[in-house]
Image (cartoon, coloured by chain):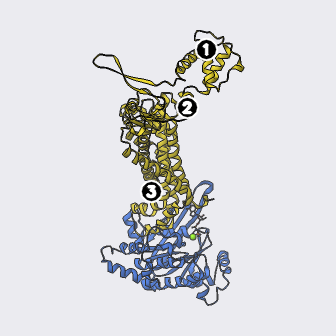
Chain colours: A blue, B yellow
Amino acid sequence: MPAERKVCLSGSGLTKVFGFGRRKTVAVDHVDFSFYEGELVSIVGESGSGKTTFAKMLLGLLKPTEGEIYFQGKKRDISTQKKRKEYWKNIQAIFQDPYSSYNIFRKIDTVLLDCIHMRGGRGLPRAKKLEMMEEACSFVNLKFEELTNKYPFELSGGQMQRLMIARVFLLKPKILLADEPTSMIDACSRATILDELMQLRDEIGMTIIFITHDIGLAYYVSDTVYIMERGRFVEHGSADEVILRPKGAYTRRLISDVPKIYEEWDLSTV
Amino acid sequence: MRHTIQQVFRSGKFVVGFFILVAMLLIVIVYPLIVTYPPLQIISQGTFFPPGIYVNVYDSIGSTRYTLNLENAAANRIASKLSNNDRHAMKDWLVAAGIPENEIDINDTEQLLGLWKGNYDPRVNIAGMTNAQRNYYIRLNNSLQGLLSTEAVIIAARNADIGALQEAGVINPSDYVNVNQVPNVRVLPLGTNSFGRDVLTELVKATAVSLQIGFVAGTIATLIGLTLGLLAGYIGGLVDDIIMFFTNLFTVIPTIVLLILISFSIGQEKRGAFTIAVVIGFTSWVWTARAVRAQVISLRNRDHVNLSKLSGHSVAHIILTDILPYIASYVVMALILQISTAILAEAGLSILGLGPKTTEVPTLGLMLNWALIYQAPILGKWWAYLPVILTIVLVTFSMNLMNTGLDQVFNPTLRE
Ligand SMILES: Nc1ncnc2c1ncn2[C@@H]1O[C@H](COP(=O)(O)OP(=O)(O)O)[C@@H](O)[C@H]1O
Ligand SMILES: [Mg+2]
């Protein structure tokens, strides 16, 4: 963790309510948070606790019902397409379900080209663009030559998530929101993907907000942990603090679901 | 994409529908190249000539004559004049006139005619006979004159100098002409209609015009519905509210009522086929707009759309590349449905007399309208309306079949 802690993304009273009347769901309920530059924050909670909704609000894909989000100390303003585009240069995401993350009508090349263009590389010579795409693919151990002219659905789930990481590699954002990136793919690929995420973090030094339902995994990867229960952050602090000395019953229950929490983490079981 | 098309053409229902439609399109395109008569030309003096081959009598006389000794020629000749009904009617008259019933054999033509000749008298009043029946017997009697004659017929021409008739030729009962050698023969497979026009030629033209109306109206309706549905569904908010307000407005008023009102207010003179197509198109987009909007709403929060946003794409780019391709199959189905509904709508309007102006082009609806006005169904002139109805059924049937096939390919749960 860096010595000088600069807040990069924070929020206060952030709330999202879906529906109204009898069908009203408070998915995120007045949460306050501060994420620091370069740290890896885990948001841990059961399924349905509001993690994805929280992430979508941070990403500017969902409008908060209430509350404010501050980006690099200033109130976030994404009121126009131009400002949104600028914001998205700083914050990117990897979604939970790789199978629905891609447009099935667009080839893999265009997905990667979009990233180069987003970073202002539209005018680059074609050879340079190819080189960048190759570099990004080899970073996640994919062969670019095998991907060109293919569609994302021709890849396996694990390969698709790695392609997502290649995207982030090209975009080099300040913040990455990874929403359960390994929960929908086969166990063998999980360790690789986590590994590549960690490498990427070291490479471009970004803040990662890692969302998971698996507190063991959170303990393994994160600096700071936020525990989410029914739309609220019930506990937060450093990983050791929260997981080794849990205060709340909910956190203890999450921990008890993971048998090997105190043992040395074995990557092959992730 | 290619895979999808392959799959579509493996669906039996789609292929059958597609085949029927293509066959109709081919007929509509090829027929006018072969039969070049103007489709609205009035050719028959008088209405509703039955289907058949019309051979020019004047030319037949001038053609080479062949003698064929065919066995049942005489019998056929008599049968064509003296139907079974006529024979029964003759027996009825004779019995009523006092001839013993067992003496009359209606199958023995010679005996029957002999009895008839000996006994029939138009002045005899038979109790209970209506005026119409009396007239029928008089007509029948006239048509029987010379029925059994085997005499030749003499053709005479008027001599221009002396003004008297001169024998020009003799026609024997066994004389034939070869139709191929008669210069003027016209085949009217579906006869003529109330205006004396060739029904088949007109029907082909009408099908072409109706299909055009369908395509124009269907395309307009689909484009409007698609655009409004995409905007309302994707942008939401105020845009959605405004679009849905108009959509609801159009939903509350039944389309057909709107169509009737607009067609009526345009006036007969300004209603061309194209105008009607545009009017139909502008009144039938509502369904498409609603359906597209619902689809877009279910798509707009998908992760691939989110990813596209995160890639900095504009709203237009997202709508065109992340939404539209996903609903393309749906839009194709909507288009086909709109085309077939538009063809039916035109028919409906025309039957009510609110279709295109009648002097320029025929449409399927107009042909039905004319057949109805001139009472073809009551007069039993089936060829003036039955083929038209069949064509309408075939067009809409083929399109609905294509849609069912598409639906089964795109929504696999519907497959049996
Ligand atoms: N678009 C939506 N409309 C209505 N309710 C929603 C919507 N998205 C999420 N929710 C509800 O909000 C709650 C939190 O969902 P989510 O953020 O997906 O949880 P998690 O990601 O932790 O599993 C759930 O109860 C879910 O049903
Ligand atoms: Mg989730």
The answer as to whether the residues below labels 2 and 3 share one chain is yes
Q: On screen, B74 above or below A47?
A: above
Residue B195 screen position, x and y as percent: 42, 29
Which residue does the image show at 38% across and 42% down from the upper left? B35
Which of A34/B13 is in front?
Answer: B13
Q: Position of residue B338 (x, y in %)?
A: 48, 48
Do the residues indicated by labels 2 and 1 lie within the same chain of the protein? yes
Amino acid of disc 2 = Asn
Relative to B276, say whether A57 is above or below. below
Q: Which residue is mark 1?
A: B118
Q: In the rendered structure, the residue with mark 2 lies on which chain? A: B
Count neighbours of disc 2 (C-alpha within 10 A) and say few if under 14, some if 14 to 19, many if 20 or more.
few
- Amino acid type assigned to the residue bearing label 3 in the image: Ile
Q: Secondary structure at mark 3?
A: helix
Q: Position of residue B72 (x, y in %)?
A: 56, 34
Q: CA distance from mark 1 to mark 3?
A: 94 Å
Label 1 crowding class (10 Å Cα cut-off): few <14, some 14-19, many 20+?
few
Q: Amino acid at mark 1?
A: Gly
**Real-space Cα separation, disc 2 to disc 1, in angstroms:** 24 Å
SS at mark 1? helix
Q: Are marks 1 and 3 in contact (CB under 8 Å)?
A: no
The image quadrant of residue A137 is bottom left
Task: Check the residue under mark 1 and report the chain it is in.
Answer: B
Q: Ligand 1: does it lie within 8 Å of the C-beta at label 2? A: no
Nearer-N-terminus badge (2/1) = 2
Which of the two discs, 1 and 3, sits closer to the camera? 1
The residue indicated by pointer 3 is: B235
Q: Contact (CB < 8 A) between labels 2 and 3?
A: no
